Amino acid sequence: MASNKKYWQSVEELNENSSIVETLRNNEFVEEIPTDEFLGNEEAMSSSSTSRRDFLKYVGFSTAAASLAACEGPVIKSIPYVVQPEEIIPGVADYYATTIADGFDFANILIKTREGRPIKVENNRMSGSGISANARVYGSVLSLYDSMRLKQPMIASKPASWEEVDTRVKAGLAEAANGGQVVLLTNTMASPSTDKLIAEFGAKYPNFKHVVYDAVSSSEALDAYEAVYGERALANYDFSQADVIVAVGADFLGDWQGGGYDAGYANKRIPKQGKMSKHIQIEANLTLSGSNADKRIPLTVTQQKYALVHLYNAVTGSSVNAPAINEKYAAEVKKAAQQLKAAGSKGVVITGIDDVNAQLVVLAINAALQSEAFKPAEARYTRKGNAKEVAQLVNDMKAGNVSTLIMSGVNPVYTLPNGSDFAEALKKVKLSVAFSMKEDETASKATIAAAAPHYLESWGDVVITKGTYSIMQPTIRPLFKTRQLQDALLAWSGNSQSYYDYLKASSSAWFSGKSWNQLVHDGISVSETAPSSATAAAADFGGAASELAKAKTAGDFELVLYTKTGMGDGQQANNPWLQEFPDPITRVSWDNYVTVAKADAAKLGLENYNVANGGLNGSYATIEVNGVKLENVPVIIQPGQAIGTIGVALGYGREAAMKKEMQVGVNAYKLYANFNSLQGAKISKGNGDHEFACLQLQKTLMGRGDIIKETTLEIFNTKNASEWNEQPQVSLDHKEVAATSVDLWESFDRTVGHHFNLSIDLNACTGCGACVIACHAENNVPVVGKSEVRRSRDMHWLRIDRYYSSEDTFAGDVKLKENTSGLMDSIETFGAMEDPAENPQVAFQPVFCQHCNHAPCETVCPVAATSHGRQGQNHMAYNRCVGTRYCANNCPYKVRRFNWFLYNKNSEFDYHMNDDLGRMVLNPDVNVRSRGVMEKCSLCIQMTQATILNAKREGRPVAKDEFYTACSEACGSGALVFGDINNSEDTVTKLKEDDRMYHLLEHVGTQPNVFFQVKVRNT
Amino acid sequence: MKKVGNHTSFSRILIFCLALSLSFSLASYAQDTAAAGTEAETAASAGAGDPVKGKELFNSLCASCHKLDGKSTGPALRGVADKHDREWLYKWVHNSSELIKSGDPVAVKLFADNNNVTMTAFPQLSNQDIDNIMAYTSAPAPAPDVNTPGGKVVVQESGASNNLILGALVLVLIVLVVMLVLVNRTLRRVAAANGVEVAKQDSTISLWQAYARNQFLVLVTTILLILTGGYFLYGYLMQVGVDQGYEPIQPIHFSHKIHAGENGIDCKYCHSSARVSKTSGIPSLNVCMNCHKNISEFTGSKDSTYVEYSKEFYNGEIQKLYDAVGWDKSTQQYTGKTKPVKWVRIHNLPDFVYFNHSQHVSVAGVECQKCHGPVETFEVMKQHAPLTMGWCINCHRETNVKVEGNDYYKKIHDELAKKYGVQKLTAANMGGTECGKCHY
């Protein structure tokens, strides 16, 4: 029987009068296929000498020729040195000690070079090097190979030679000698020889000024320290000396005062003899420090100021009147004050509030406590910028008083809130010179864009803290026609010396006990005499406190501007590693955004939601500060954000001299009025939604206490390990036995030779992510770009998972989960548990290949591309992999990464691996993977093999703790410890026996070689 | 993998057959063995000294700075006896600086002409010794090589008569064939004329048709063909990308046969980074110049077995080195103009393999020849081993680890030896066949 069914071909057919349906009834395509364009021209067709037959001949010939040509192997040329430098042996890495001082990041580091190319940053573990390298410092080596760098000096945007520049500048300076202002505007260099050089240079000009400008200012903290201790510097802190830390609006595990405090902090966070420090964080944005705190109190900045006054009253016994604190947290602030007072000299208070009074009050509290962690004598020189002088300079420029302006390491057109004013004022300056690595916003508007070298191509000296002296040495010949500021100043002041000679000659004034060669070799010299104690001048601390108590909220919302762990002040914005680095807190890469509390977001109608492919979307918002509007700022609803505050990261939204892919985010510097991180702001919902590249979809742990095991210090000290570090049990012959004792396989005997294990201490890990970038550099991990990350195709071998609690604590989550029963109850409870709490507990967990002894990935590989070594590493033979991805599906830890595309030499992925310069950073010992291949952490087998080979060659056993991986090397806080558990001396062997040791998903029975240490909170 | 080599030899057998058949038709080679005149004979009459003893002394004492012909650190010495008074020469050799100090005009000029380099004093030489040296230096220069410069020794064609004979034979054969055809045709014509019926062939089926009808035979043949085809195809495919025997022409003809073989220079003197690095390193040109600063020409005797090319050819190659490194032979100075040499890389492992020379050379003590073959006999460097994974693994399975005297292995060796119950451990026992040891 014939069917009367009508089959629909498209929705369009619903519309009876549709012209499309009518057309389709008669034609195959709706639109005419434009065949006439190439077939219609009869004349051209007939006059063409190429017939169809010829065409086929050509095709046949070229196919045959191509296949014939393919039979021949390529001829590879090798070009050795004509004269091989003595210190270079091809294939052997050289290390050079140097120091980074880019005005924002300061650290003593080692540079690994291969065949003369710097390829990786490592920590200088020589004693005295205080600040360990962070993610940006690890990434800085890639900025050396930035293809958008300025390759020669430019005069009025035209390439020029340095001789032309010299003539031009000397003429300009000669003119200025008659009385015009000569201003040198630099970032914080902390270089005594440069200061000396600048003084000598400036002495020739009657109206010379040296203005120091920090893009992200600490001007108030400097003012306060100067007022009390008489020097423009910052007080240093040693958190390993503190039992109680109260941080008020200071992200000291992030970039506060130049960072680098995590090592000392983590040292005191690992429970020893039942003791660890207590950390209370009072802040508005959720920061790294807040995430690691035992107690986090979310308060608006104004309320933080009141809290400081309360702390001041409690510690010094004064009674300055201060408004009451948000009643929800008032008791906790009071408790914090009591604990601080009880700790006495073992307590410390710090603040990052940009307010001189707040800074003075903190100095007063620490002095009153006689805090051992507070080291005013060891002044830090990592910030020196003077906000007032910068403002004055802009005014002078506008008035046309500045004749010559020389800039170095700064980009005011981008980083000043009134950047466009500065650009206008720049036109009134007769001669402006900008030393810059790139033709950035400022350099492109200056008369002369002077190509400056990267710090890895420069000489220099740095005093990071008083009593230390560090050397910056070049690790490669300048790649381009660049000249550093110091050399230029010498040339312009008629001194024929090179800066190297100048530095060498003058450096002996600042260090002693070492020869110059020894100093350059070590990279650092520490003076043997301890710095004399700083004498505090009397200051009106009471007055400061009462001034502080008068603080008022401005605007509807308090906008708190901050710097992200990956991007900092934005000078490395064209660095793809750092762009793809996920923010430790939000786990969003390739963006900045405004963080809003959930309650505020609901009021404003702002939302976040996930779309079908897993990507995160967020509303746009418009932020207005003092009439300055910032439109289309994407919104992230941030658990832990203090209600009434919003946060935006600085350093994004750069456009000049940037690859197109890298031009992401909005420029929040426009809102950074008066260099104050606190601004009164209005926020409203904008149009449309933003597509984020967020690496983590699941925000909470859903009460799974066996993923991140944690306990409190009290339980840890009083109860048996089996209670707070429960081992999973399974039923065997109707008896409960430890899950690890049941095994399908016969275990391989691993007692001989090396057996590598890696310990991750969740107490010491601050989530800073230095390991992530170090891993990128060591293992040639590709950058895949925003849209691929959004599709969850990120390639990070090492990820740091961040979890929020959905109750107030993770323990609360576990309890809630255990008390849930029945289907309806479960659905409701678990549904609710997906949402984090308003002020959640936060936990970080670095996860990478666990190198399971019984690896699920190995058994499912159809081609045996992944197999186990007896040293405990799970091997991955890329050349054998055919890309079935079974392994990734069978991995319970989700650590395997698939190369969906060819990421090198592919213009679709225009990052560093797509240009000759960027590829110079690749590690020659590690394969660059191709498309269709699975990859993952190898426990840096190239590094362990190199260590073994060194020992073999020297005919000795491997020394204690000699083994490193890139991540364990990068870990300044000592959370990641790598070693050989068959060597009883190694630190990791003891950690494996520790009561706190547990494996991730132990009940699965994978027997990983990576293990964690239970997180202990001092609540 | 060894068998694979046999598969490929099929083509080689073919080539061999072809070569064999050709060689019969070609003339045999005749080597030119014109002997060079010995210097000693001609020089014997030159002076009172003994040129043979003089040559010994010259080579041991003078040759580091002087050459017979051509300037080195010092001037050329051929015919020096005629330029100076013999007494003066004794004084000069015994202590030249004293002679210069005394203000002797000839000595001062000589000193100035040679960049003010003082000649080492030889007070130990007797006057007779000096006479001997002078006798040697007074020998006339040998006549230049008559061979064509730059090429192999010319092949002399002496097989014209052979070709002639062959040609004649071919001609005879053709005549025979033509005669046969003609005879056949005549016979047929005669038969037709006489009315004789030429017997037609029987209608029995031909061998081919019988074969085609026998399905079993066809099947067996097909299977055999497929199997043989598969065998050779497999062999062919397995050698794709295996460059065993790769012997490219290099920009500078460097003879390992002369350097490592005849001169006995240790491999690691030039390839020094093999001891400490993953790469053995193509020697940088400054390493060549350690010796070639003084050795500006080829001095090997022509009839030695190790010489395959003419003296001029080798001298030309040394000149190429000088051009590349920027060395001016006449002024004995570097010009600073360098032209880095683009060598053609022979041993080339894929990117996904990690190989470390120092592991094998320094730790395991493997001889270079084990992988690179008898390099000291190679006039032109070539790839000796197949460098396939099977080849690597085989060696790892068979080779014992050199544990003696290496403290690294002590503990591991004791434990492993106990575990496996053997005293000798192979690299595979130590985990040398695990994927991740070479692939990362």
Image (cartoon, rainbow, N blue to C red):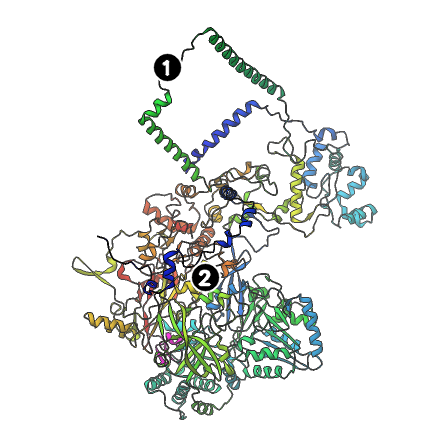
Judging from the image, mark 1 belongs to the subunit labelled B
Residue at figure coordinates x 65%, y 42% from the top left: B318
Q: Classify residue A418 by image quadrant.
A: bottom right
Residue located farthest toward the left when viewing the structure as drawn: A734
Q: Could you tell me which secondary element the residue under label 1 belongs to?
A: loop
Q: Residues within 10 Å of mark 1 (few under 14, many from 20)?
A: few
B308 sits left or right of A975 in the view? right
Q: Classify residue A978 by image quadrant.
A: bottom left
Residue at figure coordinates x 66%, y 66% from the top left: A160
Residue at figure coordinates x 70%, y 79% from the top left: A177
The amino acid sitting under disc 2 is Val
The amino acid sitting under disc 1 is Asp
Task: Read off the magenta span.
Answer: A271-297
Looking at the picture, does residue A1009 appear above or below residue A75? below
| Residue A293 on the magenta span | yes
Image location (x, y in percent) of residue A679 = 46, 83
Q: What residue did someone put label 1 on?
A: B202
> Where the C terminus of chain A falls, by quadrant?
bottom left
Residue located farthest toward the top when viewing the structure as drawn: B194
Picture disc at residue A783:
2
- Which is nearer the eye, A686 or A551? A686
Looking at the picture, does residue A7 appear above or below residue A275? above
Q: Residues within 10 Å of mark 2 (few under 14, many from 20)?
A: many
- Frontmost of labels 1 and 2 is 1
Is residue A619 something one can see in this rendering?
yes
